[in-house]
Amino acid sequence: MIDIQENIYFSGKYHVFMRRVSTNQQDIKSQILADEIYRSLIPDHLILIMEEKGVSANKLRYHEREKMKELIRLIKADKVDTVYAFDRTRLFRKFLDAMLFFDLCKKHKVKIIYTSSEHIQSTNRALLEGILFVFAEEDGKNIARKSSEVRRAYPAQKYGYVRSEDKKRYIYNPDKKETILLLFEKLQLVKSEEEFLELVKTANKQFKLNPKKFLSIIRDPFYAAHDLINKKVKLNHVDPYIPLNKYNQIQKRITPYFDNLFKKLQELDTIQPISVPVICGVCHKTLKLKKNFSTLEAFYSCAHKKKDQKIVMSHSELSINILEVLPSLVERLDYKKYISDSKKTSNFLNKQLDTELSKITPKLTDIMDKIILDLDVLPEEWMNHELYPLYTKYSAQKTEVEKMLDLQDELYKQVLYLTKLVKKEIAFYLEKDFLEYISLFFKKIILYKDNIVYETNAANYYTDLPSQPSVNK
Ligand SMILES: [Zn+2]
């Protein structure tokens, strides 16, 4: 579930709840239950409920569905704020219909929220959305695979297993069998968090199982040939690596260790690279942020050829250093001139990008229309259409320009942030998100064995700048 409060606000437009069952015998109740929490937060007069009963999205195109046509009419009239559906398949099963609808929603700034708790939320990224709809289309042809229980019981792949020839059984993968048996055996002997972490390290070193993978295996009841998510279900088609009672004992005893490690891994996951190029002072390579999931460290390093000058610097150490250097730069910045120049550049670029976009969009619509006209005969074949390559080409161009526009927005936000920064002074340095904005000040950061050199951005805007502010480590 997404954060409702953050995503619903009342624009005076409708919040449309779209529900669909493809036969009259199917039950619509689960869809009603799932959207209840959203409806409870919206004033009654803004709620519009549309139910399609006995309407198969596999068989019918959107223009053959009365309620869908009504929804599209409302969206085109700018009367819709958000469309709620249980999942993508409730809206469409036809890829092309879905893409058209998604484009329409984007154009009229209509949000789409999926109320099923297991569903991936709607995104703004056309390509990803397209892929997800392909799954919906595929899914429609294979209703049997739909429920998540089935997916848990019959995963496409599972580490340590291979499928039997008739695909009905999950049998031990002989290459992995000893490893997994050994890990579960050792887990039963673990008596402290230290011992647990020791085992995590061993798994990483000896068996190339990084801690994430390791956790995902030892917490998964599939290895005990059970599904335990809703109720206890024995999976008779799975070779167990550990008996259920022993699996349960392990979970009970070691859960706090699991949770601690999981939290640390998540923290490490969220660490972002410094937003300015970090460069090796010896070989001049741009360094990537590396993460070591067994030592739980994020760091920059370069071994290059001169072994005695190996460079290693942790992300946290570098961040602290940056925060120490910044105040002296802020003091010297002629921010009024900087802001006014940035605004000018930004406006100029935005205009150019807008022009570009207004050239591509009609071309794209034109091609889409042509493809759709042809496809009334052959709806499944649209990717084979002769215009399809051109469509993807213009789509890609459009995405590229939109990305640039976003970037422009981001730069403009940075400038506004800078204004605030200069006014609010030191307290701002301690704010979490500050590291995202350091590209306002630095062009690159160069790491040497014993010191760090900062190259400033927009050097023209500083007064009395020392040639290069550098700091000894
Ligand atoms: Zn190097």
Image (tube, rainbow, N blue to C red):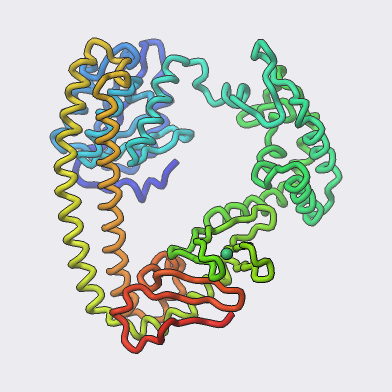
Residue 44 lies, with reference to residue 295, above or below; the image says above
Residue drawn at the location 18% of the way across and 31% of the way down: 365
Q: How many marks?
A: 0
Task: Answer with left or right where residue 245 lies relative to residue 79.
Answer: right
**Near-viewer residue (393 or 179):** 393
Q: The N terminus lies in which quarter of the figure? A: top left
The answer, for residue 461, to whether it is visible in the render is: yes
The answer, for residue 39, to whether it is visible in the render is: no
Task: Answer with left or right where residue 26 lies relative to residue 450.
Answer: left
In this view, the residue farthest toward the front is 305
- Where residue 394 sits: x, y (%)? 24, 36
Quadrant of residue 22 in the image?
top left
Residue drawn at the location 16% of the way across and 33% of the way down: 363
Residue drawn at the location 23% of the way across and 10% of the way down: 377
Where on the image, by quarter, is ligand 1?
bottom right
Quadrant of residue 451 in the image?
bottom right
Task: Answer with left or right where residue 350 lies relative to residue 277.
Answer: left
**Near-viewer residue (233 or 261):** 261
Residue drawn at the location 78% of the way across and 41% of the way down: 250
Task: Answer with left or right where residue 353 lies relative to residue 253.
Answer: left
In this view, the residue farthest toward the bottom is 464
**Near-viewer residue (210 or 143):** 210
- Where residue 164 sits: x, y (%)? 69, 15
- Where residue 367 sits: x, y (%)? 19, 27
Q: The C terminus lies in which quarter of the figure? A: bottom right
Residue 401 lies, with reference to residue 15, above or below; the image says below
- Where residue 274 sits: x, y (%)? 48, 64
